[in-house]
Amino acid sequence: EVQLVESGGGLVQPGGSLRLSCAASGFTLTSSWMHWVRQAPGEGLVWISRINTDGTTTNYADSVKGRFTISRDTAKNTLYLQMNSLRAEDTAVYYCGRGPGSHSENWGQGTLVTVSS
Amino acid sequence: QSALTQPASVSGSPGQSITLSCTGASSDIGAYNYVSWYQQHPGKAPKLMIYDVSDRPSGVSNRFSGSKSGNTASLTISGLQAEDEANYYCSSYTSSRILVFGGGTKLTVL
């Protein structure tokens, strides 16, 4: 059974950094594209980033390009999102998703990131 | 890349059929058959309902169907049930090699 478990969320000050993790089980990261999607409180879904099956291709939404980095550790079967220069508008629940490059078939339960002083 | 456009809310009665729309551009919905639809109940993670415009994942009811015409995609739910009440989001791959979501439609079952 495919399972995705996000962790690493919390309260961080503006300008700070945080690294989110997404532990995958039931499949290997080398077999799927992986995505990060976020949802601000009371708002809709926003796609943030994706990484391909061999880790050579990464794409980012304009809103996070240059500040966020998607990566993975295949030995740990874990996906990461390094978030730097955080802003109040980055406050959201962050979901990881598994699928082909065009959509997510499976989702984690999400981890909440709050950017506030 | 602008978000796709969805109506904020739609309502229907049990047993009815309703159609949710999702309007994009020639650089996203109009260019690729990579439109997907997600259902999200409050406080829950999204669930994939339709992918590649009209394909249904295993386990999703055949009451859900998808289509596309030009720059607009549609999700049709037939035989509306109380459990269908949720937020629905469309998404598309784009020419910028990124994905974009719509703002979401809140479906109310009267």
Image (cartoon, grey):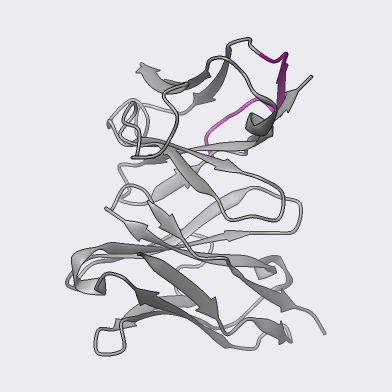
Quadrant in which residue B56 is drawn: top left
Q: Residue furthest top?
A: B16
* Residue name at image x 55 percent, y 50 percent: B46
* Residue name at image x 28 percent, y 62 percent: A33
Q: From the viewer's perspective, is residue B23 above or below residue B43?
A: above
Point out the image quarter for the C terminus of chain B.
Answer: top right
The residue nearer to you, when weighing B24 against A103, is A103
* Residue name at image x 64 percent, y 47 percent: A44
Left or right of A100 in this view: A6: right
Left or right of B27 in this view: B105: right
Task: Where is residue B28? Give x, y as percent.
Answer: 36, 34
Task: Where is residue A27? Give x, y as percent.
Answer: 27, 69
Task: Where is residue A10? Give x, y as percent.
Answer: 69, 83
Instruction: Judge whether residue B12 is colored magenta.
Output: yes
Q: From the viewer's perspective, is residue B94 above or below residue A61?
A: above
Q: Residue furthest right?
A: A117
Instruction: Judge whether residue B15 is colored magenta.
Output: no
Write down the region rendered in magenta.
B1-14
Task: Where is residue B78? Give x, y as percent.
Answer: 53, 15
Is residue B1 visible in the rendered image? The answer is no
Q: From the viewer's perspective, is residue A43 above or below residue B13?
A: below
Q: From the viewer's perspective, is residue A96 above or below residue A14?
A: above
